Amino acid sequence: MKILVTGGAGFIGGNFVHYMLREHPEDEILCVDALTYAGNMETLAPVMDNPHFKFIKADIADRETIYAIFEQEKPEVIVNFAAESHVDRSIENPAIFLQTNVMGTQVLLDACRKYGIQRYHQVSTDEVYGDLPLDRPDLFFTEETPIHTSSPYSASKASADLLVQAYHRTFGVPVTISRCSNNYGPYHFPEKLIPLMIANVLNDKPLPVYGDGKNVRDWLYVEDHCSAIDLIIRNGRVGEVYNVGGHNEKTNLEVVQLIIATLGKGEIQFVRDRAGHDRRYAIDPTKIHNELGWLPKTKFEDGIQKTIQWYLDNKPWWENIISGEYQNYYERMYGNR
Ligand code: NAD
Ligand code: TYD
């Protein structure tokens, strides 16, 4: 199978590339990535010499280039990870989120129509469902939960999902969608909660917890997300949405305190809350379990230890990131908070 992975120089896409080359050495992986601030060739360095892997730098919203890639490379399966992915940046500047997440998705879908493919898989998020109240632990997101978005990021992801479903219904493009909860693991850009806190502890900087720190996220080790997508592209039913999550709900404070306890230091600083901050995400993964037999392998307690160890063992990977433009981002986001 020839699989086009967009956004493969990012966190989850990069882990997916490694996962697929390891689990399915017979497949060919073509990675297309625009190398925005979030893309990092260091993440792909270990596979650059693999004869089953090829990298092309391109923007998914650049129609001409994307059509040329489809024409020349003839991918059979598309897995679209490419996106602007950070909620705080979407609050600062929504436009690029619509451009990449919506218009980019449309270009890929048009290419699928024009050149024909076996499967288009859209990597979506549980954030399209909005949030759940903290005092109703009995509620979970199912695939039937109405779309109800809070941030420009989640609105752009939901828009892309609707477009994917429209291209299936109207043009017959064979699509699937996965909506996963918060991922964590190696190669996670240090603007997101877990890697940011690990990097700050190691650099003796305060740990900025938004609001009261009681917001709940449902954490999934990134490899478990990769295995879910792998199953969906092979055995998932065309036209279907699959929620992906492992019942690992934690408050932000619990996560930060676990990082402090593991590293033996770190000082929490409560800072101004995020605008529109979603209170709780929680996935009901019954459908993917019953239909495809998917189960997560890594418990949060083990996954977080592995992740912290990875950041200890791979300092050059993240120190390189935070030494550059990231400093300006950090000052803009946290300087006056
Ligand atoms: P990321 O920000 O780490 O990586 C995004 C990648 O996409 C980068 O390599 C970037 O260079 C590339 N990219 C951005 N704009 C592009 C464009 N116009 N053309 C081509 N490439 C472009 O993001 P991530 O956390 O790995 O998320 C990947 C996907 O998974 C996203 O679609 C996101 O919405 C979804 N998702 C993420 C999470 C999570 O917890 N991180 C959870 C559920 C779903
Ligand atoms: P994040 O990693 O940005 O993921 P998302 O907003 O997509 O869930 O944030 C996870 C949670 O951590 C969210 O409730 C916001 C909170 N948070 C902080 O408290 N401090 C921070 O510095 C960051 C980046 C996030």
Image (cartoon, helix red, strand yellow):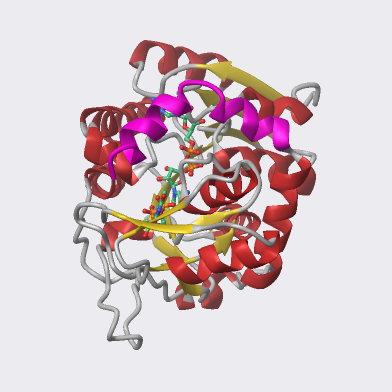
Q: Residue at x 73, y 58 (%)?
A: 306
For this rendering, which residue is in front, 313 or 20? 313
Q: Residue at x 39, y 72 (%)?
A: 282
Q: Residue at x 57, y 28 (%)?
A: 321
For this rendering, which residue is in front, 259 or 64? 259
The answer to whether one can see residue 223 in this image is yes
> Position of 297 compared to 124: left or right?
right
What is the magenta range? Answer: 315-337
Residue 63 percent coordinates (x, y): 34, 16
Q: Quadrant of residue 184?
A: bottom right
Q: Quadrant of residue 93?
A: top left
Q: Residue at x 40, y 25 (%)?
A: 328
Q: Quadrant of residue 105?
A: top left
Q: Is residue 309 magenta?
A: no
Residue 168 percent coordinates (x, y): 31, 46
Q: Is residue 331 magenta?
A: yes
